[in-house]
Amino acid sequence: MGRFFITFLVWAICYATCKAQTSKPDTIYAEYVQEEIQLDGKPDEAVWKRAVHIKNFTQRELNIGEPATERTEVAILYTAKTLYIGFWGYDRNPQKIIAREMKRDFDWGGEDNFEVIIDTYNDDRNGFLFAINPNAARADAQVLNNGESFNKFWNGVWDAKTTITDEGWFAEIAIPFSTLKFPTDAQEQIWGINFERNIRRKREQLLWQGWSRDSELELLNRAGTLAGLDSIVSKDFIEIKPYAIGGGEFTPGQEKGQLNAGGDINYLITPTLRMNLTFNTDFAQVEADRQQINLTRFPLFFPERREFFLEGQDYFDMGMGNSIIPFYSRRIGLAEDRSTVPIIAGARILGKVKNSTLGALSMQTASRDSIPSTNYSVVSWRQDVMKQSSIGILSANKYENGRWHSTTGGYGLYSTSKLFGDKNLNIGASFTQNINSDNYDSKANAHRIYLSYPNDKVEFDMAWQRSAPAFNPEVGFLRRDNFQEFYAELEWKPRPKNFLKWIRQFSFKGLDMNYFVFDDTGELQSFSYEIRPLGFETRSGEFFEFNLQRKAEGLREPFEIKEGITIPEGDYWYNRMEIQAATFSGRTWSVYSRINWGDFFTGKSTESTYELSWRASRYLKIGANYEKNWIDLPEGSFDTDLIGSRMEYAVNPNLFGSLFSQWNSEDEEAILNFRLQWIPIIGADFFFIVNQAYDTSGNDWKLERTTILGKLIWRFVI
């Protein structure tokens, strides 16, 4: 027995070591240069040839552990103010490179691309992600909590140029140090860094370090090291971004002009802690919400689309999932009908001080019609503990008409990516409660406990959460109230090796359950159980799944699903089936479809969704979507339609736009949104927007409203 234990221990140690996914060299040295680098996408100057090149890239997909099939190199230079990254993406068939996007914040999931993530805190948790494609399209994101939070709406000030030759594609990236937050108390900066290259036609994914299937680029604890940064000039940083807006709104028989100005001031309190001040805040350039049709008795959720709030969104996340959101930024500056409420001014602090991540936000809105002037203030603090874990608190507050409301609580997360060598495990808990100045005795609360084992071959999740009957986060969002939820999901995702080699990965699901009961009575509120007997993704990028579903709804009162059609109270159990399929999004033409059919309360229904995308060229992309529902109930029958189309165009990476239209049969209103964005210099933006709304309830489209606006945002650095 003892011999067996020793043998097993030796095997486990070797297994964990083999799974470390570290390739030597795992340190890249930046070389200091005094002259500015000419950013032209041709890293062929003498300084680039002198720099240390790393070439040891390894496949994560499709053939894990094997060397790159195309030669890939990276080198780093820097001046006192700017970090430069050179990329050499050699390709023996450059005519097959997939690059059909040029706009800022492009969708890099279907493109050949190069990505770099930089952990400037060197804390194995937080980083800045930068992505480019062969057309020099740029995208970036903030990564927090070792990949647990991913904010792709963060926009840093940086630039990139690329070239495509008969040898492949090549790039130069310039990132000012003022874009990055990093501590300055060390004489030499030691940062975490990692690189990824995707060759889409081969479905090949290359990483420098950490290429485990249970890892990804965003897991910063598996990154390599960037050294040699010992000549960075640190200085105070003040960024001023004023805006001016002009235009008008036109309705039949009335014209209303608009002329306004405001702006933001950003100040680095410390190299890692930034303050934002905003005045007369305006979001005219934000695209309209995507329409939804609601066939449930629960409110719809619309994601935040305003950049100011998106940038700090992850700082105010308590890990309570999607059903209970203590802070929902759309409560600020938007009424219940999603119309605009003016924002007078606001202040925000975001950043990290040693092992503490801090976030604070205070916004004052103006009165509008019956809506009073209101102050919204949110404070969060998160403390790093152990290697990847954390604890924190969050308080979201609202003050209006002399009344104060607070939703305040705490949370904790144990996280590791070293389980059984390289497996991921997260265990967390959250608790929050309401406090109202007009009823201090009513302290309704909500809480959540969860476990997640998110790995490549086996994924298991479970959670329990509760929202008391009186719990109401007035600065948050509740998908449903007065509930307890019991959730569990188990998915097995094997990869065939010796048969069906055209399949990259299967997906079999034997357990996917959401069971909701009313908290005050324990009676059924909702139930959903899904089994997936077959699901797979092909090596060429196609996707298919077939699901069997068992559902239930417990109605305490009659539910009017459509005007004139009401479902009586009671418990309803029914069965449904679903098929989803999609082709690889990197192709010129790609499609997605979903059909869900079966019983529905006391009748039948069929729900269907279809999406089509044509990536005509790097200058033009056209997409269309159609949703159709057929509902047949003893109480009445009806159908719904939702149609949308989207055309995206780009002249170059700094001049691009879109034309977005949508219509649904419930509102009988068509919305058209035209948007043009020009980046005259990096950090500044000009927008030209045309929005139109049409009433389609009659035989003809009737123009209800036209809005035409121009907005200029400029950037000054002091």
Image: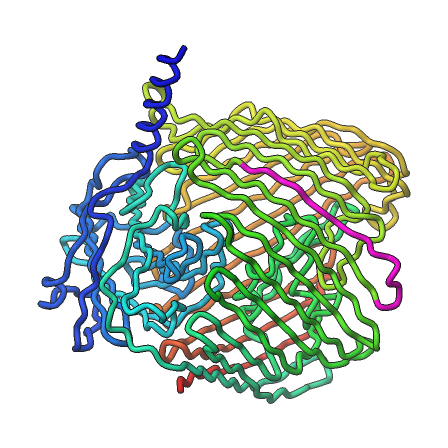
Residue shown at the point (44%, 40%) measured from the top left:
417
**Residue 501 position within the rendered picture, expressed as x and y whole percent measured from the top left:** 33, 25
**Residue 513 can be seen in this image:** yes
Determine if the magenta segment contains residue 21.
no
Q: Which percent across, then down, holds residue 565? A: 86, 44
Q: How is the image coloured?
A: rainbow
Identity of the residue drawn at 58% across and 85% down: 247
Q: Is residue 499 above or below residue 175?
A: above
Q: Which residue: 30% across, 34% down?
A: 64
What residue sits 42% from the left and 62% below the top?
105
Tally the numbered discs.
0
Residue 111 position, x and y percent, is 34, 51
Q: Which residues are magenta?
A: 437-452
Quadrant holding the C terminus: bottom left
Q: Quadrant of residue 332?
A: bottom right
Direction from residue 89 to residue 145 in the image, left or right: right
Residue 387 position within the rendered picture, expressed as x and y whole percent measured from the top left: 45, 48
Can residue 703 be seen by looking at this rendering?
no
Q: Residue furthest top?
A: 1
Q: Is residue 509 left or right of residue 65?
A: right
The N terminus lies in quadrant: top left
| Residue 450 on the magenta span | yes
Q: Pick the residue in front: 249 or 527.
A: 527
42 w.r.t. 481: above or below:
below
